[in-house]
Image (cartoon, coloured by chain):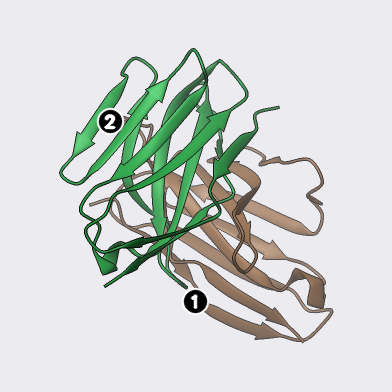
């Protein structure tokens, strides 16, 4: 159990367009999901915490108007990169915490490789 | 805010040897410390975790130790195998609902 999926796995887009990435918990309910960004050979940088039914909490330096997060249900959070630019190219990974039993563990999605041309 | 330092950044060992990765954290209120293994292009996978009320935890070839006084925690891998080669991340969490702060990662290479 505790499987998290992301869609799409890879996306290439033109500069100025918007891209939506979905994060789903497949076999559990997640009241909290997290969005990370990872550069090659670097650590995971937390972008925001997404809580079901409320506004996301963004980390310092992350533009909330550029990285729109919606957590509309207990199994789905979306990250929309608006007006994407080449510097937004990165590996975006989500994670989810189970509701209820043992809420310590975060389960990660497989990541989405975004390339902005 | 919370800061996690991880060392070394790269580690190369011979198959069968032990590997040790160390992390320090800054906030004494941190209470949960997971370790993740990430293979190239893949998702981080939880391999072991420890809570602040425990000093040591072991799972087969993997063990984690925690020194709350010194704010140190370490990952120990014994009898390393080539398939242990990956990047390992430590993390610390502040509070029950708190976010995870990750260390910089250690690239472990196990040579056959």
Give the chain ID for the brown colour.
A
Q: Which chain is mark 2 on?
A: A
**Quadrant housing residue B100:** top right
Q: Is residue A53 left or right of residue B37?
A: right
- Bin the neighbour count of mark 2 within 10 Å (Cα to Cα): few under 14, some 14-19, many 20 and up: few
The quarter of the image holding the C terminus of chain B is bottom left
Q: Secondary structure at mark 2?
A: loop
- Reply above or below: B62 against B111: above
In the rendered view, would you say B21 is above or below A93? above
CB within 8 Å, label 1 to label 2: no
- Residue B82, can we see it? yes
From the image, tell me which residue sits under label 2.
A101
In the rendered image, the residue lying farthest to the left is B60
Residue B86's disc number: none
Mark 1 belongs to chain: A
> Looking at the rendering, in which quadrant would you find the N terminus of chain B?
top right
The percent coordinates of residue A84 (x first, y second) are 79, 73
Q: Secondary structure at mark 1?
A: loop
Q: Nearer the viewer, residue B44 or A116?
A: B44
Q: Nearer the viewer, residue A98 or B30?
A: B30
Q: State the residue in front, A86 or B4.
A: B4
Q: Is residue A84 visible?
A: no
Question: Residue A95 at x, y = what percent?
Answer: 47, 51
Residue indicated by mark 1 = A9
Image point 78% across, 79% down: which residue?
Answer: A17
Q: Residue at x 49, y 72 (%)?
A: A7
Q: How many marks?
A: 2
Q: Identify the residue shown where x is 36% and y is 44%.
A: A29
Instruction: Name the spot of residue B5 as percent of width and height, x first.
Output: 60, 38
Figure colour of chain B: green
- In this picture, residue B98 sits left or right of residue B67: right
């Amino acid at each position: 159990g505790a499987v998290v999926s992301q869609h799409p796995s890879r996306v290439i887009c033109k500069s100025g367009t918007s891209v939506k990435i979905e994060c789903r918990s497949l076999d559990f309910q997640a009241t909290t999901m997290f969005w990370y960004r990872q550069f090659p050979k670097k650590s995971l940088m937390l972008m925001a915490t997404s809580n079901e039914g409320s506004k996301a909490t963004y980390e310092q330096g992350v533009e909330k108007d550029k990285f729109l997060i919606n957590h509309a249900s207990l199994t789905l959070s979306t990250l929309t990169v608006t007006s994407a630019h080449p510097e937004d190219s990165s590996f975006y990974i989500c994670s989810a915490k189970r509701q209820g039993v043992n809420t310590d563990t975060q389960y990660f999605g497989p990541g989405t490789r975004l390339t902005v041309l | 805010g919370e800061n996690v330092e991880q060392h070394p950044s790269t580690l190369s060992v011979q198959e069968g040897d032990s590997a040790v990765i160390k992390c320090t954290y800054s906030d004494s209120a941190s209470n949960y410390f997971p370790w993740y293994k990430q293979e190239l292009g893949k998702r981080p996978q939880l391999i072991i975790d420890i809570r602040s009320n425990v000093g040591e935890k072991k799972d087969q070839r993997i063990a984690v130790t925690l020194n709350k006084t010194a704010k140190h925690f370490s990952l120990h891998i014994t009898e390393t195998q080539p398939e242990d080669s990956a990047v390992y991340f430590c993390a610390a969490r502040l509070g029950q609902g708190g976010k995870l702060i990750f260390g910089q990662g250690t690239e472990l290479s196990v040579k056959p």
